[in-house]
């Protein structure tokens, strides 16, 4: 009888240890995905902050291109106001397209392309776009690892038991055409 109790206690102890190990792993993966999103958010905010000054520089040269600058402002505001990851990706596609249109306008103004302030902003925007792409890749990887751990056995059992602690995350997807439209800086 005592051997049976010892075996049952050992099994219960082993199940609890496995549960806590899996629980802690899921918490680490969830927090990694959240942190990765914050890294994207930092880069997006950096881009949002650059755009008004960049538009000001370009607008000084291309004053009759008002619609282009209004589309950048509208796209920026929409992207800033989205909180859902999927909707933010769509809004960011629109903003990337609007930024590309500013660079296309700049092609018509050789004196603008030669302006040092324009060139500096163009470099900053290109650098920021690269950072966003890297942060997006890291975030999507973190989400994939988290989702794999949540959906695989035995993690799925822990997730079902504590569903409110383990939300699902959306991937931050931007259309390939929008990323291809990000202008290179030819200086």
Image: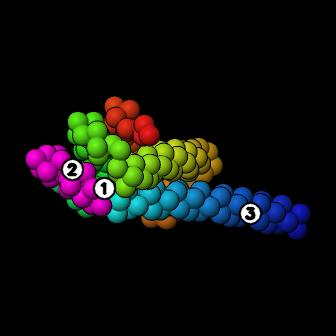
Classify residue 9 by image quadrant: bottom right
Marked residue nearer the N-terminal end (1 or 3) = 3
Residue shown at 24% from the left, 58% from the top:
56
| Residue positioned 44% across, 57% down in the render | 43
- Magenta part of the protein: which range? 51-73
| Residue at mark 3 | 17
Q: Which mark is residue 156?
A: none
Q: Disc 2 designates what residue?
A: 61
Q: How is the image coloured?
A: rainbow
Q: Position of residue 119 (x, y in %)?
A: 40, 49
Q: Which of 2 and 154 is in front in this view?
A: 154
- Give SS at disc 1: helix
Category of crowding for the residue at label 1, using alpha-carbon neighbours closer than 10 angstroms: few (below 14), some (14–19), many (at least 20) = many
Q: Can you tell which mark lies on residue 54?
A: 1
Q: Is mark 2 on a helix, strand or loop?
A: helix
Indicate which label's residue lies in the foreground, 2 or 1: 2
Q: Which of 162 and 144 is in front in this view?
A: 144
Q: Distance between the residues labelled 1 and 3?
A: 56 Å
Is 60 a magenta residue? yes
Where is residue 171 drawn, in percent x and y? Answer: 43, 46
């Amino acid at each position: 009888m005592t051997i049976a109790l010892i075996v049952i206690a050992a099994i219960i102890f082993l199940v609890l240890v496995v549960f806590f190990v899996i629980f802690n792993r899921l918490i680490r993966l969830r927090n990694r995905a959240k942190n990765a999103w914050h890294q994207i958010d930092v880069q997006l905010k950096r881009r949002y902050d650059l755009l008004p000054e960049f538009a000001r520089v370009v607008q000084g040269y291309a004053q009759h291109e008002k619609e282009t600058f209004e589309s950048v402002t509208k796209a920026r505001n929409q992207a800033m106001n989205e909180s859902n990851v999927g909707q933010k990706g769509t809004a960011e596609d629109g903003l990337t397209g609007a930024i590309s249109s500013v660079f296309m306008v700049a092609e018509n103004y050789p004196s603008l392309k030669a302006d040092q302030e324009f060139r500096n902003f163009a470099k900053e925007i290109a650098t920021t776009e690269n950072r966003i792409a890297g942060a997006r890749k890291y975030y999507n990887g973190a989400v994939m690892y988290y989702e794999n751990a949540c959906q695989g056995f035995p993690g799925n059992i822990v997730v079902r038991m504590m569903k409110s602690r383990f939300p699902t995350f959306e991937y931050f997807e931007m259309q390939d055409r929008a990323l291809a439209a990000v202008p290179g800086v030819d200086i």
